[in-house]
Image (tube, grey):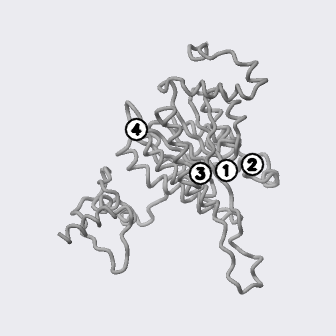
């Protein structure tokens, strides 16, 4: 038995019979020295793949913040002192920010974000039931985009902020849950397809700069059909057991991306019992296609305030870019434009 385990009081009787003391135990473990464990935030942790990821990380010695909109304090308590539940709506930046801040305040660091929360389409973009009407159809419910796509963007920015503050060395790893539908669209879930495809390209785009400048790795896992709450049981039954991907395959893929220091911008497909690295898309027009997506450092600095730090970035003179008449500068450039206006006035 480890020294950490022997320090824990025998609370079996209390845990069994008194809910009040369950919460007291959670408070006691919050005072545990911060440096003893790696710290992860797992979104969508109350069920399915998120729950499995949490159990896997806890079993390997991580301290895990279970972030979910579905309340599940009981599950967190069942995980023991290495897990804690935080009510979180990933579609809300403020809600995610509150969770990240609370975790960092408690643990003093953030080593990993598993951006796993996800839902499917909540309305039909085909609007077949609107064929006989000439009225403008109601706005679609884009909750899927808000959770599956914007939730990853919000979480990534917050993870960058807090991983920069890690001591003695800044950095960490982000892994997002995408889907095979990101590469092979499913006509029944068109918004979901788009959200998950956005996640894959977002990860590939962010990875080089985050690795070079922040010591942060970002990757993604693309599950196949996994028998979780997001998949209607009829779909799972129709797919057949031979086509169902066990959750254990997904946790193995996550483990690879969390632990491998070389994994950055890597997309892994979890399909049945196989973990397959997804190749980058081919450059269909060779060097010309490559040049179209190569960073031009003056533009990068103009947009983000610093050069990219990428070895293959194209160098050049600083941009002297005036906005078109009637347009407003992007908010990330507002500081530059304020300085320009001030210099003009003087």
Q: CA distance from mark 1 to mark 3?
A: 23 Å
| First along the sequence among labels 3 and 4 | 3
Q: Which residue is mark 1?
A: 224
Q: Nearer the viewer, mark 4 or mark 1?
A: 4
Q: Residue at x 68, y 71 (%)?
A: 125
Q: Which residue is mark 3?
A: 90
Mark 4: which secondary structure?
loop
Q: CA distance from mark 4 to mark 1?
A: 35 Å
Q: Nearer the viewer, mark 4 or mark 2?
A: 4
Q: Which residue is mark 2?
A: 229
In percent of width and height, residue 286 lies at: 39, 63
In percent of width and height, residue 244 lies at: 74, 47
* Other residues around mark 1 within 10 Å, as few (<14) / some (14–19) / many (≥20): many
Q: Quadrant of the N terminus?
A: top right
| First along the sequence among labels 4 and 1 | 4
Q: Residue at x 71, y 47 (%)?
A: 226
* Other residues around mark 2 within 10 Å, as few (<14) / some (14–19) / many (≥20): few
Q: Which residue is mark 4?
A: 165
Q: Relative to the observer, which residue lies in front, 188 or 77?
A: 77
Judge from the rendering whether residue 295 lies leftward or rightward of residue 280; answer left or right.
left
Q: Quadrant of residue 339?
A: bottom left
Q: Residue at x 49, y 58 (%)?
A: 281
In percent of width and height, residue 332 lies at: 37, 61
Q: Residue furthest bottom?
A: 134
Q: Nearer the viewer, mark 1 or mark 3?
A: 3
In percent of width and height, residue 224 lies at: 67, 50
| First along the sequence among labels 1 and 3 | 3
């Amino acid at each position: 038995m480890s020294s950490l385990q022997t320090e824990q009081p025998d609370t079996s009787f209390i845990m069994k019979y008194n809910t009040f003391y369950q919460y007291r135990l959670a408070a006691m473990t919050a005072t545990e020295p911060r440096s003893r464990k790696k710290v992860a935030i797992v979104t969508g942790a109350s069920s399915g793949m998120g729950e499995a990821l949490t159990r896997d990380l806890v079993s390997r010695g991580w301290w895990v913040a279970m972030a979910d909109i579905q309340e599940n304090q009981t599950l967190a308590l069942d995980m023991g002192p290495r897990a804690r539940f935080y009510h979180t709506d990933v579609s809300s930046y403020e809600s995610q920010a509150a969770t990240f801040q609370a975790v960092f305040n408690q643990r003093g660091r953030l080593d990993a974000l598993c951006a796993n929360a996800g839902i499917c389409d909540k309305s039909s973009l085909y609007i077949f039931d609107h064929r006989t009407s000439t009225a403008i159809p109601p706005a679609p419910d884009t909750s899927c985009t808000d959770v599956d796509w914007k939730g990853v963007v919000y979480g990534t920015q917050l993870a960058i902020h807090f991983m920069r503050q890690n001591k003695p060395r800044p950095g960490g790893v982000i892994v997002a849950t995408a889907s095979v539908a990101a590469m092979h669209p499913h006509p029944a879930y068109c918004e979901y397809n788009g959200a998950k495809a956005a996640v894959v390209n977002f990860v590939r785009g962010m990875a080089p700069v985050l690795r070079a400048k922040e010591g942060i790795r970002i990757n993604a896992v693309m599950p196949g059909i996994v028998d979780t709450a997001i998949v209607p049981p009829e779909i799972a039954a129709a797919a057949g057991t031979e086509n169902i991907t066990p959750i254990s395959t997904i946790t193995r893929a996550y483990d690879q991306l969390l632990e491998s220091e070389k994994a950055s911008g890597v997309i892994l497909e979890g399909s049945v019992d196989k973990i397959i690295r997804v190749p980058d898309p081919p450059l269909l027009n060779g060097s010309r296609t490559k040049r179209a997506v190569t960073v031009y450092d003056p533009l990068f600095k103009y947009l983000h305030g610093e050069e990219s730090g990428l070895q293959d970035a194209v160098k050049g003179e600083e941009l002297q870019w005036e906005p078109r008449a009637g347009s407003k500068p992007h908010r990330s450039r507002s500081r530059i434009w304020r300085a320009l206006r001030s210099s003009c006035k003087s």
